[in-house]
Image (cartoon, helix red, strand yellow):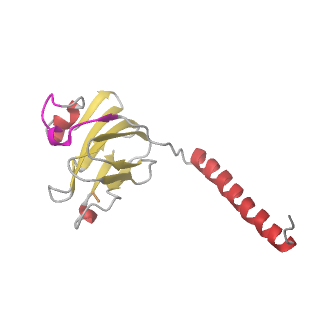
Amino acid sequence: MHIDQTEKRYIYLSVGMVAVFAILLAISSVAYSINLVSPEGQVNPAHLTTPGATAYDGFAEPLENRVRMLAPNQYEAYIIGYATKGWKWEPNEVRVPVGSTVTFYVTSGDVMHGFKVQNTNINVMVIPGQISKATVTFDTAGEYPFICHEYCGILHHNMFGKIIVE
Ligand code: CUA
């Protein structure tokens, strides 16, 4: 089959670009610690806050106890996103000492949300009935805002909170 010289160049160029992008993607996924989220567990969104109703009893704690210390500098945080409660995260503030490793368990009480923590590699979908789990170590003191990044209704932009590392 005859392929015109110019056409050949464009075929090589487009295949080459795909190869370059694939290589850059592989390099950046290592450099920025990009990990695919694996399924963690399932819950009934209607009974999240009922003590003993799910395997994730942290969600059933009162708001002020949704962040637990497991050991010095080891924490876990249970966060629920709600559209039906006026678009908010519960809790919307997490306070931990600098150097802490925090495992976040995030889920939704109603519709699909997203959970992104600025200046970390946490960026997960928050799906009703599913638990999204992500662990990060906060080595630098400061405030780390988190937002909902999945359009979830008219006041989607109100779904934000912060992690205070002190
Ligand atoms: Cu929740 Cu957007």
Is 44 covered by the magenta stretch?
yes
Q: Position of residue 103 (x, y in %)?
A: 36, 36
Q: Could you tell me which residue is drawn at 44 percent across and 53 percent down?
A: 119
Name the quarter showing ligand 1: bottom left
Q: Tell me the magenta residue range.
A: 41-53
Q: Is residue 38 left or right of residue 12?
A: left
111 w.r.t. 103: above or below: below
Specify the quadrant that holds the N terminus.
bottom right
- Camera-nearest residue between 120 and 108: 108
Q: Could you tell me which residue is drawn at 26 percent across and 63 percent down?
A: 156
- Camera-nearest residue between 55 and 161: 55
Quarter holding residue 9: bottom right
Q: Position of residue 34 (x, y in %)?
A: 52, 46
Q: Could you tell me which residue is drawn at 25 percent across and 33 percent down?
A: 68
- Camera-nearest residue between 58 and 143: 58
Is 13 covered by the magenta stretch?
no
Q: Is residue 40 left or right of residue 91?
A: right
Q: Could you tell me which residue is drawn at 46 percent across and 48 percent down?
A: 121
